Amino acid sequence: MATKPVELPRGSPATRAEWARSPERGSLTLLRMMTFVSLRLGRPVGRFILFFIALYFFLFAPTARRHSIVYLRRVLGREPTPHDRFRQVASFASIILDRLYLVNERYDLFEVTVEGEELMRERVESGTGAFLMGAHFGSFEVMSAVGRQRPGLKVAMAMYEENARKVSAMFKALNPANKSEIIALGHIEAMLRVRERLEDGVFLGILGDRTLGDEPGLLVDFLGKPALFPLGPMRAAAVLRKPVFFMLGIYKGGNRYHAVFEKLADFSELRPGEREAAVAAAIRKYAGLLEKYCHSEPYNWFNFFDFWRGPHGQ
């Protein structure tokens, strides 16, 4: 399990993470076409079309395939079969399609179960927000379906500026009337906005399993080898003295999702001098929880890049 911090390396702009340098696959035009077809002809037709898109990605994305094999080899403890690899790609494609329906508020199409609901209810009743630390695992958009069923649960997303621009454009392509709140990080104004929204009782969603390469990170053992996890998101929660909940929207196949909430850290009572140790402990716990769910739901993790930063991830 992820228990041992190794170091706090800092990269340079020239070594920005591969995922941030990679061009986007697909286009907004394709998204609009998929939206038109799927919303009018239904989810079964959309899933049929998506099978061929997944097959194309499976056959003609060699870099993603290489990194997928490394991950699946680690999490499965054996050499992944073509079926294993296609299952991961098909799960990713299914979640992308379902994002289309969730952004268009077609919550009636899905069965969503919730684990840890009492934790969220207690926090909503407190009147102040908290951080939801997710990952590129399953669907974060399923939070909108959870929120619809639970009045008072309001969620905004915080992400790196370039990613925020892309996601905002994608949401507008899927639904021009979409009002999802996305806060672009990297500016002083962003932290002020984050603080303001938390005090308004909004939950701030942020993904904690990618770094840009030019930011500080913590090396933690993950699936048998040290991997770099960003310090920034957890440090922000510590500076703002807010609790952090681990959150995943696990895809269970078909139209079924399972949302998981677990208490990760509570920085509200930090004493002077404890911040860095508390942040490191919270990141280790986060990595351990993510590792646990990768083992139980291995086809739900979608980091198709060199996560371990090795020549072949070996």
Image: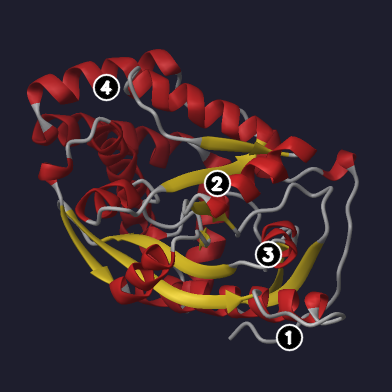
Crowding near the residue tagged with mark 2, few <14, some 14–19, many ≥20 C-alpha atoms within 10 Å: some
Amino acid type at circle 1 is: Lys
Q: Residue 95 in the image: x percent, y percent?
A: 31, 45
The answer to whether residue 12 is above or below residue 231 is above
Q: Residue 129 in the image: x percent, y percent?
A: 50, 59
Lower position in the chain sequence, tag 3 or tag 1: 1
Secondary structure of the residue carrying tag 3 is helix
Q: Which mark is residue 197?
A: 2
Mark 3 or 1, closer to the camera: 3
Mark 1 or 2, closer to the camera: 2
Q: Which residue is mark 1?
A: 4
> For residue 218, what is the image quadrant?
bottom right
Task: Tell me which residue sits at (88%, 40%) in the image.
Answer: 13
Lower position in the chain sequence, tag 2 or tag 4: 4
Mark 3 or 4, closer to the camera: 3
Secondary structure of the residue carrying tag 4 is helix
Lower position in the chain sequence, tag 3 or tag 4: 4
Secondary structure of the residue carrying tag 2 is helix
Q: Which residue is mark 4?
A: 34
The front one of 126 and 222 is 126
**Distance between mark 3 and mark 1 Cα atoms:** 17 Å
Image marks 4 and 1: residues in contact by CB distance under 8 Å: no
Image marks 2 and 4: residues in contact by CB distance under 8 Å: no
Q: Which mark is residue 234?
A: 3
Secondary structure of the residue carrying tag 1 is loop
In this view of the protein, can residue 78 be seen by the observer? no
